[in-house]
Amino acid sequence: MKLVWGAALRPKFGQSVSGDAYLALPYDDDHLLAAVIDGLGGGDAAAEAARRAVAILESDPAADLTDLMRRADRALVGSRGAVMALLRLDARARTAEFVGVGNIGAQVYSDLLIKPISKNGIVGYRLPQLLRLAYTYNSGDTFVLYSDGISSRFTTEPPPDLRRSPQQIADEILARFGKDNDDATVVVVRSE
């Protein structure tokens, strides 16, 4: 089984810098760490907070997700802070782990009950007690992480055509549900 992914990001209408960031980092042959980070506010200060979080994740993608979130919290102290969600998939074991803080959304298309939820809080300012959720998944399952720049209607409308590539799905979600008044980011990961 392999993992394929796509991502789409754009800044708020009229801005040239996005305060959102994402990561989709394959490692150890059959693992992938995916994240969506939304620096609070917008512009350069939000982008800097998001970049700090990405640097922490890239430095040790195999670390425990709660540990990565705590490291990001320490790295973001003194910044605007951020909300973020982390998703790790193991293609060989078909397991998924999720840890989220703040209003990063997660939608999973699966025959199994997979409902990732985030805890309220702000990374770098007010980290809650972290909740690590673990799931098994099937071949063909599709995971979507998205910032609040994607309308919540996304989860109630008919789903995108899941036969398309993850990149095409991410582009479609951004085009159909991206808000003009906020930075918007979506990451799509599928098991094949």
Image (tube, helix red, strand yellow):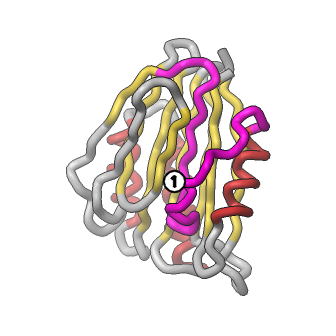
Residue 112 in the image: state x and y as whole percent. Answer: 45, 24
Relative horizontal placement of residue 121, taking residue 13 as reference (left or right):
left
Q: Which residue is mark 1?
A: 156
Give the quadrant of residue 146: bottom right
Name the magenta segment's main secondary structure. loop
Q: Is residue 98 visible?
A: yes
Give the quadrant of residue 64: top left
Residue 40 in the image: state x and y as whole percent. Answer: 46, 74
Disc 1 is placed on an element classified as loop
Residue at x 37%, y 60% (from the top left corner): 102
Question: Residue 160 lies in magenta, yes or no?
Answer: yes
Residue at x 29%, y 63% (from the top left corner): 121
Magenta stretch? 137-165
Residue 183 in the image: state x and y as whole percent. Answer: 61, 72
Q: Amino acid at mark 1?
A: Thr
Residue at x 70%, y 82% (from the top left corner): 13
Name the image quarter holding the C terminus. top right
